[in-house]
Amino acid sequence: MIPKATPKPRSIDLSNRARMLVSCPDQPGIVAAVSRFLYEHGANIVQSDQYTMDPEGGLFFIRIEFDLEGLNERRDRLKADFALVAEQFSMKWSITRASRKKRLAIFVSKEDHALLELLWHWQSGDLDAEIAMVISNHNNMRELVEPLGIPYHYIPVTADTKAEAECRQLELVSGQVDVVILARYMQIISPKFIEHFPNRIINIHHSFLPAFVGGKPYAQAYNRGVKIIGATAHYVTEELDGGPIIEQDVQRVSHRDNVDDLKRIGRHIERTVLARAVAWYVEDRVIVHGNKTVVFS
């Protein structure tokens, strides 16, 4: 019997650490008000990042990590008090405990490289999350996943059974996970499924979007004779490959590379891009605005 593998624990004590994400119309006094609020409640700011789209009339974004003794007992009161500050500045905001690991469901088909990268990051402790389950329309990955103590669910999908398969998937993930990761899951997600996870489904698309949307992007790239290929991690929306982009990367190629070469090179880009995007999500570093994101990486 293969022993269960567990991720290495993080060395930093996160039991009293929280993360605050804020977006609001830019105006004077936002940073002062948030900082004063945290100071008056006895919190110590350990990291702060901010960005403004335009100091005059634009939107302002801020991410703050802070430590607060007795956070678990004081969190509800903290949120109730901060709602008054938020109302003053018309803020969209959240406060989350850093110690609460987000639960991931990873969807995968036949290719293993994106899944393996996430598993490696998880085992090394670099992905501070809980992989609640892996769901696949093939049985190929079971021997990779189950020895790690991660539940593996095989749900085959055909044109005739797609709706039934999605219902089964929803039964498994609803109320059980925070985010769904499509690690080269080669099925289109229906609007009904997306409704249950708005801006909580992350896909890796094997092209530098918006170029080469849809199927066989490497063949499209080869036929176009591109000199750079890439990969894009994005949130899934009803528009195919059109959701808010979280992360992208590229690599140079040449006329000597055929379609198989592009696929081989692309796999390395895909795995790193997806791993970065997922890590940033679980660390509350991504704010969605319209069809864009602000990422405090």
Image (spheres, rainbow, N blue to C red):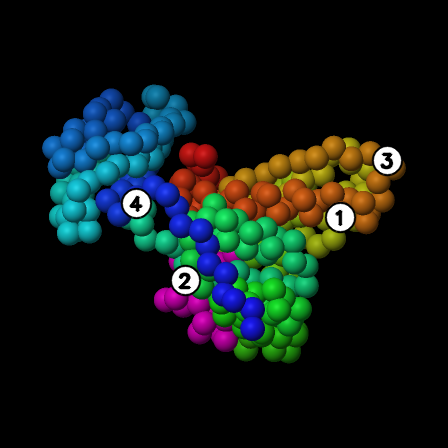
Q: CA distance from mark 3 to mark 1?
A: 14 Å
Check contact, mark 4 vs mark 2: CB within 8 A.
no
Q: Quadrant of the N terminus?
A: bottom right
Q: CA distance from mark 4 to mark 2?
A: 21 Å
Q: Which residues are magenta?
A: 166-181
* Mark 4, secondary structure of its residue: loop
Q: Quadrant of the C terminus?
A: top left
Who's the residue at 48% across and 39% down the image? 292
**Residue type for callout 2:** Val
Who's the residue at 80% across and 40% down the image? 224
**Residue type for callout 1:** Lys
**Residue type for callout 3:** His
Check contact, mark 1 vs mark 2: CB within 8 A.
no
Q: Compare marks 4 and 2 and give the one earlier in the sequence.
A: 4
Q: CA distance from mark 1 to mark 2?
A: 31 Å
Residue on which the image places disc 1: 263
